[in-house]
Every structure is written in structure tokens, then in C-alpha cells.
Amino acid sequence: MLHAENLNQYYGSSHTLRSISLQVARGQCLALLGRNGVGKTTLLKCLMGVLPVSGGTVRLAGRDITRQPPHVRAAAGIAYVPQGREIFARLTVEENLRMGMAILPGRQAARISGEVYELFPVLKDMLQRRGGDLSGGQQQQLAIARALLQRPQVLILDEPTEGIQPSIIKDIERVIRLLRQRGDMAILLCEQYFDFAHALADQFVVLSRGAVVAAGSQAQMAGDDVTRYLSV
């Protein structure tokens, strides 16, 4: 579904991404692992079109989208939940959710899907509360719900457990597992925490200094082999 090949990217003279290739299929979850500062978020922004690549290609369902801007990629079926959530703090929960439906045709965007409330029941009770008044965990649930309302083919999650209380981490894990089992989208999960990713992912890619240093299936990625690239 999503295929990146030989991606390179620079910040000035700094070579931040070095010939990175990955692919994630419909119905699968790919975990992107690595400690802070190795290029994970930069890679996700390149996949979403927020940052330009210096070389390589990005394809969605076989279509070359390497030079497409973010709004075109969103309309094509990529939903991105950025690190730090980035919800609209002064808008209500309902208004934030409707922003996620902005790319849909008018009739489809007229009503918020009830499935979102089934996945995140807390949001239904907070529709008129401002996003900035929610807890960090509730904001993360809102950000994921907003992305799902795009009806994506690919869901990109950048460190969804960061700064979140354990009870809500369990809720987010449950939702990701359900989405993977449903089989109608590809999920790219960026994480620092091996145990959380290992419980959900089918495939793994590990970054260090902007390059892929390990990759494989869940069965191939032993904890000790991976966590040495995650510890500070």
C-alpha cells in the first residue's frame, strides 16, 4: 500500500535520511523504531509531503506521490497523527473531528461516523469541550479519531504513547490492534518503546543516524537485538 524506496533528505549540509526503503501492506502494521533524533519524524514528514525529499520515491498503491503536497496525499488516503497530537486547542472536540472530514465529499462529511465513538467513547461525552481542555491522553484519542474520519488507506502514527497515562495507552493499543485486524488499511507506527510496538506490529524497521540498521518480521526481531538501538 505504502512503499518508499531509497529516500534521502538533507537539512542544510546535514544528511538526515540515508537511502531509506520500507513498505507496509494493507492489513499490516509496520513499526518504525529508534531513539530520539535518528530521523523517525523526519521520515514520516517526508512520507506525508510536509518535508521534501532530496532523492528516492514514495508510492501509494503503486502511484508515485513523491512530489505531491500534503493535502493531495491526504485526499489520496494517507492520514497522519503527528508527534505531540497538534489538535486545534481552541476548537471543540466536535469541530476538531469535522476538520478530519474536510477532504470528504459533502454528503459523506455531513455526519461523524458512529464508529469513532465506539472506538473512543470518551469523545462522545466531550463534543462541546474545547480540545485544549482535554488531558494529554484524551487529546491523543481525539487526534487519532480525527485521522480515522479521513477514511484512510494508510494511517501514520508518530509516537502515540508519548506522555500518555498507562490506562489510555491500553485503549490506544486496543484500537490499533482492532484496526489492524479489520484489514482495510496499512498502519505505520513510529515508536521508541519496543514492548508496545512488538505487541502490535507485523514488520519492523529500526533507524539509527538516519539509516536503516535492522528490519524484519515480528518473529525475527528479538528484543535484545532491537533495544540496543533504543536505549540512550
Image (tube, helix red, strand yellow):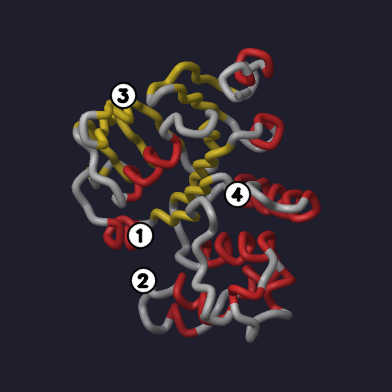
Which of the 4 image quarters holds residue 226?
top right
What SS does tag 1 mark?
helix
- Who's the residue at 63% across and 23% down the image? 231
Is residue 165 toward the left or the right of residue 58 in the image? Answer: right
How far apart marks 2 and 1 lie (CA) works out to: 8 Å
Q: Could you tell me which secondary element the residue under label 2 belongs to? A: loop
- Mark 3 Cα-neighbour bin, 10 Å: few <14, some 14–19, many ≥20: some
Q: Mark 1, mark 3: which one is toward the viewer?
A: 3
At label 3, which amino acid type do we have?
A: Arg
Q: As displayed, is residue 219 above or below residue 24?
A: above
Type of the residue with mark 4: Pro
Counting from the top left corner in percent of width and height, residue 169 is at 73, 50
Residue position for label 3: 18
Q: Is residue 73 left or right of residue 107?
A: left
Mark sitting earlier along the chain (1/3): 3
The circle drawn on residue 160 is 4
- In three-dimensional space, the C-alpha distance between marks 1 and 4, rounded to whole angstroms, equals 19 Å
Nearer the observer, 135 or 172: 135
